[in-house]
Image (spheres, rainbow, N blue to C red):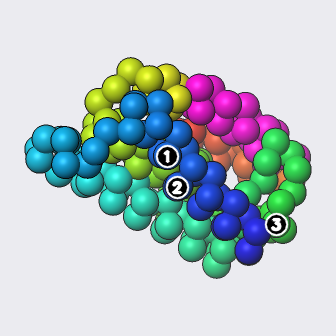
């Protein structure tokens, strides 16, 4: 449960708040309607993909998503997931989060917010590589085969 709460606080609320702050805290009313509609569609699609991935991870992987740079926050997944949202992406939860942030970037339309996203992206690549190493250790050849046929994000 800690992993879900931490994930929400950091990735769904915290990072977008930091992006908004970096953008100069614009008022929602100042965002053009077409940008707000496009941003909302991307945010909803991203959140839907992330939630689907979390539910699938809990049910099929029998574990939780929050593994911070090799430090277990909640029990890790016990089963390798290669179907559902994991059929098309090895990291669908993160792909969904990136779609969510893309929506926020469209709404904010600001280079400082983009810089926050770029820094986060770089940091998350370290996390992804750490997680891939763990999955190779935990699942061996099964993960290596999955890695060959499924892209990291799309």
**Does 74 appear in magenta?**
no
**Could you say which is closer to the camera, residue 139 or residue 35?**
35
Question: Eyeballing the image, is 95 above or below 79?
Answer: above
Judge whether residue 102 can be spotted in this image. Answer: no
Q: Which residues are magenta?
A: 119-137
Q: Nearer the viewer, mark 1 or mark 2?
A: 1
Q: Is residue 151 left or right of residue 125?
A: left
Residue neighbourhood size for the residue with mark 1, other residues' Cα within 10 Å, grouped as few (<14), some (14–19), many (≥20): some
Q: Earlier in the sequence, mark 1 or mark 2?
A: 2
Residue 45, placed above or below residue 20: below
Q: Which residue is mark 2?
A: 12
Compared with 133, 60 (above or below) is below
Q: Judge left or right: residue 104 versus residue 71.
A: left
The circle on residue 17 is 1
Residue depicted at x 78% and y 53%: 67
Image point 73% across, 64% down: which residue? 3
Q: What separation in Å lies between label 3 and label 2 (alpha carbons)?
A: 18 Å
Of the numbered discs in the image, which one, if any, rests on residue 74? 3
Q: Quadrant of residue 128?
A: top right
Counting from the top left corner in percent of width and height, residue 1 is at 74, 74
Label 3 or label 2, whichever comes before in sequence order: 2
Is 134 part of what is drawn in magenta? yes
């Amino acid at each position: 449960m800690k992993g879900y709460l931490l994930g929400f606080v950091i990735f769904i609320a915290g990072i977008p708040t930091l992006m908004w702050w970096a953008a100069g805290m614009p008022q929602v009313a100042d965002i053009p309607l077409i940008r707000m509609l496009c941003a909302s569609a991307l945010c909803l699609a991203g959140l839907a993909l992330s939630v689907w991935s979390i539910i699938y991870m809990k049910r099929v992987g029998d574990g939780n998503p929050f593994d911070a740079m090799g430090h277990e926050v909640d029990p890790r997944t016990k089963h390798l997931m290669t179907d559902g949202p994991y059929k098309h992406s090895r990291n669908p939860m993160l792909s969904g989060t990136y779609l969510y942030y893309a929506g926020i970037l469209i709404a904010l339309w600001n280079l400082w917010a983009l810089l926050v996203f770029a820094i986060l992206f770089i940091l998350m690549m370290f996390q992804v590589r750490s997680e891939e190493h763990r999955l190779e250790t935990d699942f061996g050849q099964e993960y290596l085969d999955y890695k060959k046929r499924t892209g990291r994000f799309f």
